Amino acid sequence: MDSIYSSTDDSSIPLTERFSSKRTRKRKSAKLVSSKSAAQEGPPVGEVSDFVDITPTTTARPRKVAAPGKIPDDDTRDSNVAVTKPAPTPTSSTRTITTPTAPTASAPGPSGPPPNTTSSPKPPPIHIQEVGDFEGFCRALDALVGRDGFFCKARMHEIMITPSTPDAYRQIIKYLTEGKYAFHTYQIKTDRAYRVVFRSLHHRTPILEITRDVEEQGHKVRGVTNALHPRSKMPLPLFFVDLEPAPNNSEVFNIHRIFYTEVRVEEPHKRSDIVQCTRCQQFRHTKSYCNRPPRCVRCAGEHDSSTCSKSRETPATCALCGNNHPANYRWCQVYKALQKATTNF
Ligand SMILES: [Zn+2]
Ligand SMILES: [Zn+2]
Ligand SMILES: [Zn+2]
């Protein structure tokens, strides 16, 4: 049986690349889902492995978004795993899209490319809903990053910008944010944590002890989370350990003892579903990298789902298809169509 792994703080990682592992290790495991999604918003939808476009049935118009602010690193509702600690609920009015800093040595994921200390990471694409004056927009970007600093691809309901360098990416994101454009993007490769799974570890093992033991082996730990069973919400003897990217990341598999316990270190399973943004309800990106107008998962209103005032008696309205179900309903026609398109290519 295939498993789905994730946790709070990796939801900001583009799911398409989060579990790109080809190395497989046999194991039994439970299917893990987000407690919040399962309990309050129905089952979440997951991810696929490329940046295929989808056509929203509700075309959003350009609209103002608030000034940039701090976004919490974790994003529970984008996650597919229940975790022991609830994530803080960010306000929809404060957005900051992480932009790359100076190029650093890239560290591969469990199945990522070999370490490369010379080339800078390729910036992720930026999807913009509407730019208005396309010619003026392009000339503005040209003035900002130069003719070779970006290229566009027009799609039915959006324009995709691919910056040439991390610096161009950073400048374009700043320009779009200041210009209050509605867009989404993805996490930069070098920001991604190197995730492994520690098995056979009692769920009450102190996080601090796990962190200390791993760091004593020469790793820098970004986060440790205990997984919960998707239905029973019982804690599992299984922890996700996220390491800061480093050339020695793969040496984490040599760890066998953590806090009096003989552990197995494994790669996370690849997810097979399609990720859905909990801010705008669209697919294939997460809210940490979304600057689109918020859409409520329950009533389809233009507000953050956490501020919804819809009563339980009022039927839900899907922000994707308009029918009477939450936007994260797995049988939504938009999701089903996307799922079909993904499996039939
Ligand atoms: Zn979004
Ligand atoms: Zn609402
Ligand atoms: Zn729907």
Image (cartoon, helix red, strand yellow):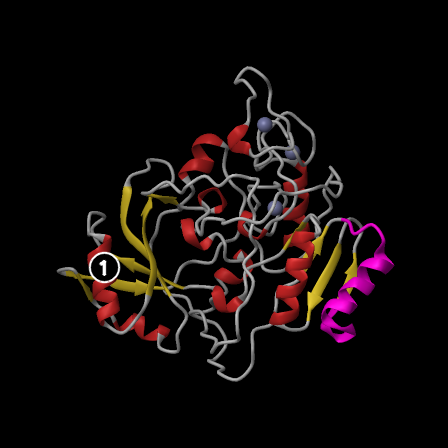
Q: Amino acid at mark 1?
A: Ile
Q: Quadrant of residue 200?
A: bottom left
Given residues 85 and 167, the one toward you in this image is 167
Q: Which residues are magenta?
A: 130-150
Q: Is residue 11 above or below residue 169?
A: above
As for residue 134 lying within the magenta part, the answer is yes
- Location of the C terminus (image quadrant): bottom right
The answer to whether residue 345 shows anywhere in this view is no
Report the number of numbered marks. 1
Q: Is residue 179 above or below residue 36?
A: below
Q: Which residue is mark 1?
A: 210
Left or right: residue 131 compared with residue 173: right
Left or right: residue 137 compared with residue 14: right
Give the main secondary structure, helix, strand or loop, of the magenta stretch: helix
Q: Provide residue 197's location: percent of width, then percent of height.
A: 33, 59
Q: Residue at x 67, y 27 (%)?
A: 323
**Ligand 1: does it lie within 8 Å of the C-beta at label 1?**
no
Q: Residue at x 79, y 55 (%)?
A: 155
Left or right: residue 147 compared with residue 320: right
Q: Residue at x 67, y 36 (%)?
A: 320
Q: Provide residue 317's location: percent of width, then percent of height.
A: 64, 27
Given residues 193 and 334, the one toward you in this image is 193
Residue found at the very far bottom of the displayed protein: 118
Ligand 2: image quarter = top right
Left or right: residue 37 compared with residue 127: left
